[in-house]
Amino acid sequence: MTTAILSALPEEQSGLLAHLEHGQQQLHAGRVFWQGRLHGRSVVLALSGIGKVAAATTATVLIERFRVARIVFTGVAGGVGDGVSVGDIVVAQDYVQHDMDVSPLFERWCVPGYDGVRLPCDPTLTAILSEAVESCLVSARGYFDHEFMDVAPRLHRGLVASGDRFITCGEVARALREPLVAAGHDVLAVEMEGAAVAQVCLDYRLPFAAVRTVSDRADASAHIDFPAFMEKVASRYAERIVRELLRNLQKG
């Protein structure tokens, strides 16, 4: 059974590609896919591209052409939830498209044809991913000490929002989050791809899980800190978490 590891940006996947064994490159739909073995498991590594449409296309190719058994998304996100700090890790339990609005025909944020506002991730795969993150944080204690974090990183589980906008303004982030929270949807983080992949995986009934490292607080510091954070933190997190995830899958 092949696991797809999906990321939005090359920096998020550079460490994984460096450890890929027997790697074979394939080009399809304008995208590069790497097949091989990673930590003893059959994998396909791919970049989703930025935004929901690009991510949906890549997820569909992984399912239709490469016949993967599951998709795991790694990447970064802006933290918007209370207590979600830079350097923390969010494992998505479900997703919402914050820029979806077909009201008054449907409830705001609801994708027509799906149950409710939230697009759920696979609970079993999500639990395995959460265990991998917890193991990573314990084993890497002290390894990520740097200028980005004042306290030790923590794991959060919950709702993540996706939309076709890179949020770099605190006022915009609050305007995005507050109506969702008021409606009972306490969003922890915001990014640009995960909800689309979750929707595709629901269509195909394929297990999906996602982990996001909080790179910023979705405010004016996002564009300043982002490149350095990708290099010094996010890529290291991704490599360690995916390694532990694949080991846990092998045990199962």
Image (cartoon, rainbow, N blue to C red):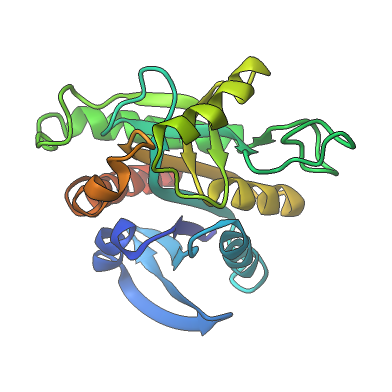
Of residue 209 and residue 197, the one placed in the foreground of this image is 197
Q: Position of residue 53 (x, y in %)?
A: 62, 62
Q: Residue at x 61, y 45 (%)?
A: 195
Picture quadrant where residue 22 is located: bottom left
Q: Position of residue 183 (x, y in %)?
A: 68, 18
Q: Position of residue 8 (x, y in %)?
A: 43, 58
Relative to residue 251, is residue 62 drawn left or right?
Answer: right
Report if residue 78 is visible in the image. Answer: yes
Q: Residue at x 43, y 41 (%)?
A: 211
**Above or below — where is 8 with respect to 91?**
below
Picture quadrant where residue 109 is located: top right
Of residue 10 and residue 62, the one placed in the foreground of this image is 10
Q: Residue at x 33, y 60 (%)?
A: 13
**Above or below — where is 83 with respect to 249?**
above
**Above or below — where is 184 with respect to 164?**
above
Relative to residue 179, is residue 231 drawn left or right?
Answer: left
Q: Residue at x 63, y 16 (%)?
A: 182
Instruction: Please state, as top left, top right, bottom left or bottom right, where the N terminus lies in the image.
Output: bottom right
**Above or below — where is 211 with respect to 24?**
above
